[in-house]
Image (cartoon, helix red, strand yellow):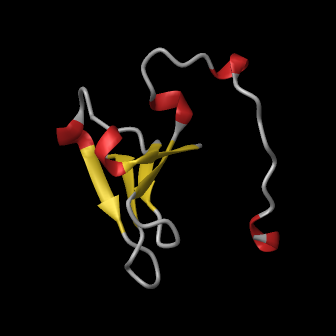
Amino acid sequence: MVYADQSDLTILQGKESLQSYRFNTHVAEHYFCKTCGIYTFHKPRTLPGKYGVNSGCLEGVNLLELEATIVHGSER
């Protein structure tokens, strides 16, 4: 996942296939493909104005070239 300003993200295709879901507090909004269920991006509760984006959904990104950072959610 990478983060981007909401104003910097443009959905190029498949917008009609997206479904959103809000967990628990209903503040964060998570988007998934209605057909295959892949997580595409979300509006985080803790970072207003940002999107958390599935890097594998970005055009032109080679996932093998990205540096990974391990994050333990319980230690956030």
- Residue 49 is left or right of residue 3, and the answer is left
Query: Where on the picture, by quarter, is residue 21?
Result: bottom left
Relative to 8, residue 24 above or below: below
x and y, in percent, of residue 28 in the image: 42, 70
Relative to 2, residue 30 above or below: below
Choose between 15 and 46: the one closer to the eye: 46
- Residue 75 is left or right of residue 16, and the answer is right
Relative to 72, residue 63 above or below: above
The residue at the point 33 percent across, 39 percent down is: 9
Residue that sits furthest to the left in the current view: 16
The residue at the point 43 percent across, 85 percent down is: 25
x and y, in percent, of residue 12 in the image: 25, 27
Choose between 35 and 67: the one closer to the eye: 67
Q: Quadrant of the N terminus?
A: top right
x and y, in percent, of residue 40 in the image: 43, 43
Q: Quadrant of the C terminus?
A: bottom right
The residue at the point 43 percent across, 45 percent down is: 37
x and y, in percent, of residue 50 in the image: 43, 55
- Residue 62 is left or right of residue 36, and the answer is right
The residue at the point 46 percent across, 42 percent down is: 38
Count of marks, rendered view: 0
